[in-house]
Image (cartoon, rainbow, N blue to C red):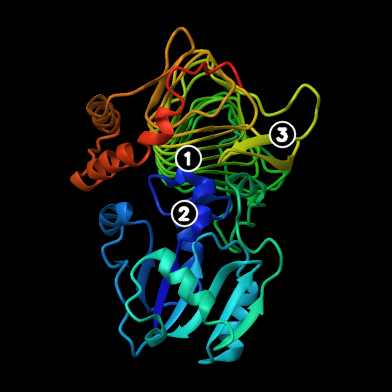
């Protein structure tokens, strides 16, 4: 049996945070999507169908993963969309139908499938795979999943509820100078964490999870639901609710209702809310995301040249990897910020990848070699260095986004 994860065309709606990774590596309150997907089945050969320019980096991240490789024709294959949100029906079909082939749709999108590999010929890319799976409807059984079974936009990930803590975990027994509001059983703190005196854990709204090696400094109030990734540091102030971070983040108040991927810094004062932050992002002092309009109306987002109705009253910013902000940067509601960009002043429009904002508030293009040097310096601060494959990805992405970037050069960032 083979288990294969694929991307469909909706990756483009997540491009700010997905330019540099397959969509199944995005983070939600439940963890990395890939980890959730792999719970479907065990002891299977793993395959993935993703954008070609991501292949080498993905092979580095997970060497046992066969990326964009044809599947031997005699095998059965379980396919699942990398943006799967609700897999309950899919799991049930796998269990009940045994070896029978089927396609599971969510609207016009393929959520999952179980088919014989010989039906896929030499398919070796996600676009061809999705088209081929759809063409099998009529030849194999078809089923329809409930609405909302696939993510369509990044802000939907901000709406996820955090799962409860596992049953039977070690009860948190804090220092008498550390306060727990609510049930201490709703707080998970590994033994190698350092919790300084005069910290408050407020678990009345939901569970609090700290990863391995987390340090929480005095004066911090962590409000659940909240997950702080391994080796991160909380420097103080109001953190949460609904903050979910990857590893090695630096966090300070005020930040809430936000997903922050690993190795990103929000060390200083300023407000981040209802936002998604990529990896290796540095948020300077005073940076603030607006997440509520002065009219209290719906936040709309410009995406792909169209105005989208989000249906949300609260929505901040979506920032890609390696974004840096200058001090006192202000981002208006619902702004999309591409990776490898530098922000300053008032940001009232979407910012494309590899661009900066000068002191006249005009958008300009960044030089590739200069950006690579910045990447190397940033990673060195966390005792890491970019691989050749990662640098190759950055160079390829620079070319792929050239047209997107050129359309905005010279435009004012404070003019919507």
Disc 2 versus disc 1: distance between alpha carbons?
Answer: 11 Å
Is 210 or 353 nearer to us in this picture?
A: 353
Q: Residue at x 65, y 76 (%)?
A: 89
Q: Secondary structure at mark 2?
A: helix
User: Which numbered dot is residue 23?
Assistant: 2
Query: The N terminus is located in which quarter?
Result: bottom left
Residue 60: where, in percent of width, then height? 25, 55
Is 239 or 384 nearer to us in this picture?
A: 384
Answer whether labels 2 and 1 touch (C-beta < 8 Å).
no
How many residues crowd mark 1 within 10 Å: few (<14), some (14–19), many (20+)? many
Disc 1 versus disc 3: distance between alpha carbons?
Answer: 18 Å
Residue 100: where, in percent of width, then height? 54, 92
Q: Residue furthest top?
A: 360
User: Which numbered dot is residue 299?
Assistant: 3
How many residues crowd mark 2 within 10 Å: few (<14), some (14–19), many (20+)? many
Q: Secondary structure at mark 1?
A: helix
Q: Quadrant of residue 346?
A: top right
Query: The C terminus is located in which quarter?
Result: top right
Compared across the picture, whether 240 is left or right of 284 comes to right
Disc 3 versus disc 2: distance between alpha carbons?
Answer: 24 Å
Q: Compared to 253, does 113 lie above or below?
A: below
What residue is disc 1 on?
16
First in sequence, mark 2 or 1: give its number. Answer: 1
How many residues crowd mark 3 within 10 Å: few (<14), some (14–19), many (20+)? many
Residue 415: where, in percent of width, then height? 59, 17
Q: Residue furthest left?
A: 388
Q: Residue at x 29, y 57 (%)?
A: 55
Q: Residue at x 45, y 37 (%)?
A: 320
Residue 388: where, in percent of width, then height? 18, 44
């Amino acid at each position: 049996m083979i288990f294969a994860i694929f991307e469909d065309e909706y990756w483009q709606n997540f491009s700010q945070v997905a330019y540099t990774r397959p969509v199944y590596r995005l983070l939600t309150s439940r963890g990395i999507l890939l980890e959730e997907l792999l719970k479907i089945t065990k002891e299977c050969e793993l395959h993935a169908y993703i954008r070609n320019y991501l292949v080498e980096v993905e092979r580095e991240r997970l060497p046992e993963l066969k990326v964009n490789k044809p599947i031997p024709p005699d095998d059965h294959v379980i396919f699942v969309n990398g943006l799967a949100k609700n897999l309950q029906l899919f799991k049930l079909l796998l269990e009940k139908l045994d070896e029978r082939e089927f396609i599971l749709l969510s609207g016009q999108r393929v959520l999952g499938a179980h088919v014989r590999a010989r039906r896929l010929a030499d398919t070796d890319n996600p676009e061809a795979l999705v088209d081929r799976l759809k063409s099998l409807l009529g030849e194999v059984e078809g089923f329809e999943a409930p609405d909302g079974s696939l993510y369509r936009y990044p802000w939907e990930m901000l709406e996820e509820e955090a799962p409860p803590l596992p049953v039977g975990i070690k009860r948190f027994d804090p220092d008498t100078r550390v306060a727990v509001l609510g049930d201490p059983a709703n707080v998970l703190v590994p033994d190698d964490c350092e919790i300084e005196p005069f910290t408050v854990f407020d678990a009345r709204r939901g569970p609090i999870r700290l990863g391995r090696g987390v340090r929480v400094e005095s004066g911090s109030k962590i409000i659940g639901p909240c997950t702080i990734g391994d080796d991160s540091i909380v420097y103080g102030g109001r953190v949460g609710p609904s903050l979910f971070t990857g590893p090695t983040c630096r966090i300070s108040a005020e930040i809430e209702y936000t997903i922050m991927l690993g190795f990103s810094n929000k060390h200083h004062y300023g407000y981040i809310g209802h936002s998604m932050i990529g990896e290796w992002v540095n948020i300077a002092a005073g940076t603030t995301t607006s997440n509520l309009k002065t009219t209290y109306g719906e936040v709309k987002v410009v995406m792909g040249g169209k105005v989208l109705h989000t249906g949300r009253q609260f929505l901040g910013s979506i920032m890609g990897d390696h974004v840096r902000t200058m001090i006192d940067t202000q981002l208006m509601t619902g702004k999309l910020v591409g990776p490898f960009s530098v922000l300053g002043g008032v940001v009232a429009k979407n910012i494309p990848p590899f661009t900066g904002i000068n002191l006249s508030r005009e958008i300009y293009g960044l030089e590739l070699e200069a950006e690579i040097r910045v990447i190397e310096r940033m990673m060195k601060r966390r005792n890491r260095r970019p691989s050749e494959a990662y640098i190759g990805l950055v160079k390829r992405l620079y070319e792929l986004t050239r047209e997107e970037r050129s359309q905005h050069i010279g435009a004012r960032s404070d003019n919507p």
